[in-house]
Image: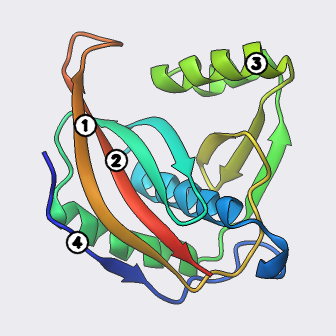
């Protein structure tokens, strides 16, 4: 299921931490910041949503979620408003290493994140790095930049596949696609 192209621009994104010159940061890392912020806002609005994974390229990003009820255009409007309020509050991003046992405890209610943790631990043999913004936590493979952004453009929501991988209730995997303008 694909919702028609829907564009929302969140203006007035404020400084998340200390301002760093954009020219010194790879475009991919800037897009990762956008995915991280979208993950935080969506999880705040929909606490029962499952975080699956975030992906970024030099031009855009997407965050994949597990939902029981598909997100629609009305949800994008709600996400846009919450995104504006969230960024206006100038939340601080914290990044830290964490013991493996503590990481498993932190993501105990996110089965897909536990799978991601297993992959990272087996690949890197190092304690996971966690990024936190307010009450939102996510796994970071590299440092999230501390920059001032102009806007995040939410481009569309796409439904992917029904999934019953982790329990008996049907979950739909959906992605929110967007891009950061810095």
Which residue is at the front of the view, 182 or 46? 182
Q: Look at mark 4 in the image and give the residue it sits on.
A: 6
Q: Look at mark 3 in the image and give the residue it sits on.
A: 123
> Relative to 106, does residue 94 appear above or below in the rendering?
below
Q: Look at mark 2 in the image and give the residue it sits on.
A: 175
**Numbered disc 1: secondary structure:** strand
Q: Residue at x 53, y 89 (%)?
A: 12
Is residue 36 shown to the viewer in this render? Answer: yes
Q: Earlier in the sequence, mark 1 or mark 4?
A: 4
Q: Which of marks 1 and 3 is nearer the N terminus?
A: 3
Q: Which residue lies furthest to the front in this view?
A: 58
Label 1 packing within 10 angstroms: few (<14), some (14-19), many (20+): some
Marks 2/1 in contact by CB < 8 Å: the verdict is yes
Q: Earlier in the sequence, mark 2 or mark 3?
A: 3
Q: Which residue is drawn at 69% across and 81% down?
A: 148
Judge left or right: residue 138 versus residue 169. Answer: right
Rendered location of residue 67, percent (x, y)? 27, 37
How far apart are the two marked residues, 1 and 4, measured between alpha carbons?
Answer: 17 Å
Q: Residue at x 26, y 55 (%)?
A: 157
How far apart are the two marked residues, 4 and 2, measured between alpha carbons?
Answer: 13 Å
Rendered location of residue 152, percent (x, y)? 48, 75
> Relative to 24, does residue 167 appear above or below in the rendering?
above
Label 4 packing within 10 angstroms: few (<14), some (14-19), many (20+): few
Q: Look at mark 1 in the image and give the residue it sits on.
A: 160
Figure quadrant of the N terminus: top left
**Numbered disc 4: secondary structure:** loop
Judge left or right: residue 29 versus residue 2. Answer: right
Judge left or right: residue 142 versus residue 51. Answer: right
Label 3 packing within 10 angstroms: few (<14), some (14-19), many (20+): few
Judge left or right: residue 157 versus residue 115. Answer: left
Q: In which image quadrant can residue 28 be found?
A: bottom right
């Amino acid at each position: 299921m694909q919702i028609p192209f829907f564009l929302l621009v969140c203006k007035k994104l404020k400084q998340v931490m200390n301002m760093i010159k954009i020219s010194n940061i790879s475009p991919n890392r800037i897009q990762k910041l956008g995915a991280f912020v979208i993950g935080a806002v969506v999880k705040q609005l929909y606490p029962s949503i499952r975080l699956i994974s975030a992906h970024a390229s030099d031009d855009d990003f997407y965050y994949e979620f597990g939902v029981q009820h598909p997100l629609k255009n009305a949800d994008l409007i709600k996400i846009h408003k919450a995104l504006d309020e969230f960024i206006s509050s100038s939340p601080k991003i914290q990044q830290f290493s964490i013991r493996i046992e503590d990481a498993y405890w932190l993501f105990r209610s996110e089965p897909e994140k536990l799978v991601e943790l297993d992959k990272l631990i087996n690949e890197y043999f190092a304690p996971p790095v966690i990024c936190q913004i307010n009450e939102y936590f996510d796994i970071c493979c590299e440092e999230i930049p501390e920059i001032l952004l102009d806007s995040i453009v939410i481009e569309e929501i796409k439904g992917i596949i029904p999934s019953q991988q982790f329990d008996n209730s049907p979950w739909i995997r959906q992605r929110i696609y967007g891009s950061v303008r810095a």
